[in-house]
Image: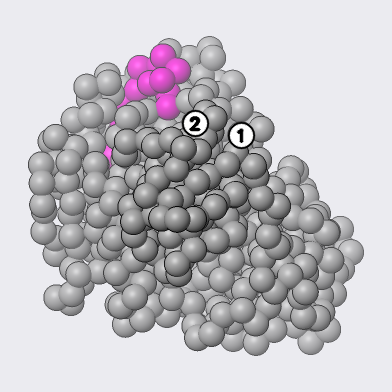
Amino acid sequence: MAQRDLAGGIAAADLAEGRIVAGAVDGTDMVLVRHQGRVCALSAVCTHLKAPLADGIVVDGTIRCPWHHARFDVQTGEAVGAPAFKPLDRFEVIEKDGQVHVSATKLRAEMPPGTVAPDLGKVVIVGAGGAGHACAEMLARHGAGASVTLIGDEGQPPYDRTFCSKQYLAGKADRAAMALPVPDGVTLHTGVRVAAIDRAARTAAFEDGGTVPYDTLVLATGAAPIAPDFYGAMRDDVHVVRTVADADRLIAASVQATRAIVVGSSYIGLEVAASLIGRGLAVAVVSDSDVPLEKTAGAEIGAMVRALHVSKGVTFHDACRVARWDGTTATLTDGTSVPGDLVVVGIGVAPRVDLAERAGLVLAEKAEGGGVRVDDQLRTSDPAIHAIGDIANVPDRRSGHPIRVEHWVVAQRMGQWLARHLLGQVDGGYDEVPFFWSGHYDLSLRYVGHVTSADERRIDGDASAQDVAVYFDEDGREQAVLTAGRDILSLERERDWERR
């Protein structure tokens, strides 16, 4: 969008309700939005990864990021929807005599509504990943931080796990860029593991024998990489990428390597391939699929992504598996020998439900997606215990059946919804529309909604030109869309399904 001089003033008639107008004041980029008759001036870039908000849309009083669908309250600037947490700056606006003038004067931050929190008792959150952190952060933001204990088994404060296979692994971002805000007032335990739950006494026990009491327990234990079964899979030169420690280990190994073998053509496997290409390694991908991403995105998108990786130097070995790895050569099930210095395995993850299972909570059947069964309030079979994130198998009103979704923003928004629910700020049940993104070099894929199979799909556009939308149906009804080069469409579908 063309920028305007907002200090000099623009016609008030140009600011229709819900329209985004880009401009600047003294070199500071801003966006203007009229909401409920009031003109609001906000900083122009998303606080998550600096996407231009002028390319987004306005929905029900929020301005939404075109890249990763973060949401900001138009009137207060508050980051009300992950993956952003830091608010937007707000600026002084004067509307008079048919003109709107904006100054570079920043307005004082407005406290979120409901910052006088109700008495929640003791809230203990087990798991400091996307879901657990977002829940704790939202509770703290609304004044309940002193009630919250957040427990993580990694020996460091919460961080953005999506960087591990993308920016951080590729060397484009450092540790500081991955850091998530430490929730104010929250008691944070890192590097410790909860070993057991006493539901009768309402306590969680650590491995060292210590206990922490709870009134509300939130399980956000996440998922763990599925271990490969080929000969040599336990060698030190076989890697997974789930945590920042995994990424550090792989980065250190890549310094001495020239060739990498990636096992699995999942989203994370291909993201790792792109990152290692960026580090100057030759990369071969071994997959038991005929086409990468075929099961989740369809053959057309899979072929597009495959062609992009090939153009960057990646070689593919499709429809086969690794049978043996000896540290220098992977022998495949079709007899091919692939030389390499290290192996990275990305064949999926499994929900970490051991703690829930030992506590006697009801688990979902594998045919339902597995995980911990919850109701639309995210409560487990024990009303004092909630489950969120990768382990939560939750009712989905759009599809009419429970789903379990393993994506970062889904986990974060589930945590945020539960926090608002505990604070008494939301009515009804959890019904967020799933969303995730995947980055490959300069290509970004956005996926809104959820289907169990990519078989029923319709294609609009040209996948080979990276300008495409793939619509997925389930039981004859559109339930998901994957886009490349169509960010507004992705945002609009998310909006429409929220309202549906």
* Res. 314 mark: none
Q: Nearer the viewer, mark 1 or mark 2?
A: 1
- The image shows residue 319, relative to residue 450, as above or below, that is above
Quadrant position of the C terminus in the picture? bottom left
How far apart in space, not on screen, are marks 1 and 2 (Cα)?
Answer: 9 Å
Badge 2 is on which residue? 167
Contact check, label 1 and label 2, Cβ < 8 Å: yes
Front in this rendered view, residue 126 or 362: 126
**Seen in the image, is 372 located left or right of residue 143?**
left
Instruction: Tell me the quarter of the picture where residue 251 sits.
Output: top right
Give the SS element for disc 1.
helix
Where residue 378 sits: x, y (%)? 55, 78
Mark 1, residues whose alpha carbon is within 10 Å: few (<14), some, or many (≥20)? some
Instruction: Tell me the quarter of the picture where residue 323 sits.
Output: top left
**Seen in the image, is 426 located left or right of residue 274?**
right
Front in this rendered view, residue 14 or 412: 14
Mark 2, residues whose alpha carbon is within 10 Å: few (<14), some, or many (≥20)? some
Q: Residue at x 18, y 51 (%)?
A: 469
Q: Which residues make up the magenta segment?
A: 275-293
Asked if residue 292 lies in the magenta stretch, the reply is: yes
Quadrant position of the N terminus in the picture? top left
Instruction: Tell me the quarter of the picture where residue 114 sits.
Output: bottom right
Please say whether residue 385 is visible from this viewpoint.
no
Asked if residue 398 lies in the magenta stretch, the reply is: no
- The image shows residue 24, relative to residue 425, as above or below, that is above
Q: Residue at x 42, y 27 (%)?
A: 275
- The image shows residue 301, relative to residue 395, as above or below, that is above
Where residue 365 sits: x, y (%)? 43, 77
- Say which amino acid is labelled 1: Ala
Please say whether residue 372 is visible from this viewpoint.
yes
Badge 1 is on which residue? 177
